Image: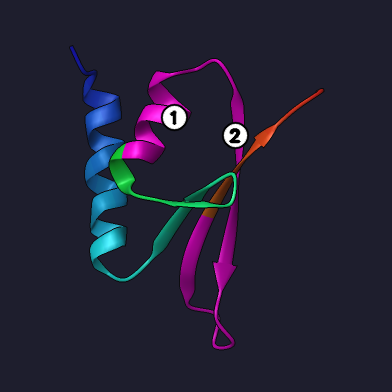
Amino acid sequence: MRSLQNEAWEILLAQMENEGISFYINGKRSNAKDVVMECCVCEEAVYMPDFVTDEKGKLREVRYDEVKGW
């Protein structure tokens, strides 16, 4: 059973995706559902988001990279 918190994250990220924002996990193109599964549900690793903007400062990508050895 999915938690309401994870469902809320998935809805938020899907809205961002619909606005043209891309998601990546460890350099691989991903989607909102996969980000939630990898970063929120499967809590075996820690991921740090990197927010990538265009030259005008508009958010274009969110890149989640696994943090190791901390």
| Residue drawn 32% across the image and 71% down it | 20
Q: Residues within 10 Å of mark 2 (few under 14, many from 20)?
A: some
Residue 40 placement, left or right of 26: left
| Residue 55 to residue 36: above or below | below
Can you name the residue that lies furthest to the left here?
1
Instruction: Please tell me which of labels 2 and 1 falls first in the chain.
Output: 1
Q: Residue 19 lies in what quarter of the image?
A: bottom left
**Numbered disc 1: secondary structure:** helix
Can you name the residue that lies furthest to the right here?
69
Query: Magenta residues, as a range?
Result: 34-62
Membership of 51 in magenta stretch: yes
How far apart are the alpha carbons under marks 2 and 1?
9 Å
Toward the viewer: 7 or 45? 45
| Residue 19 to residue 43: above or below | below
| Residue 33 to residue 20: above or below | above
Q: Which numbered dot is residue 47?
A: 2
Q: Residue 10 lies in what quarter of the image?
A: top left
Q: Which numbered dot is residue 38?
A: 1
Which image quarter is the N terminus in? top left
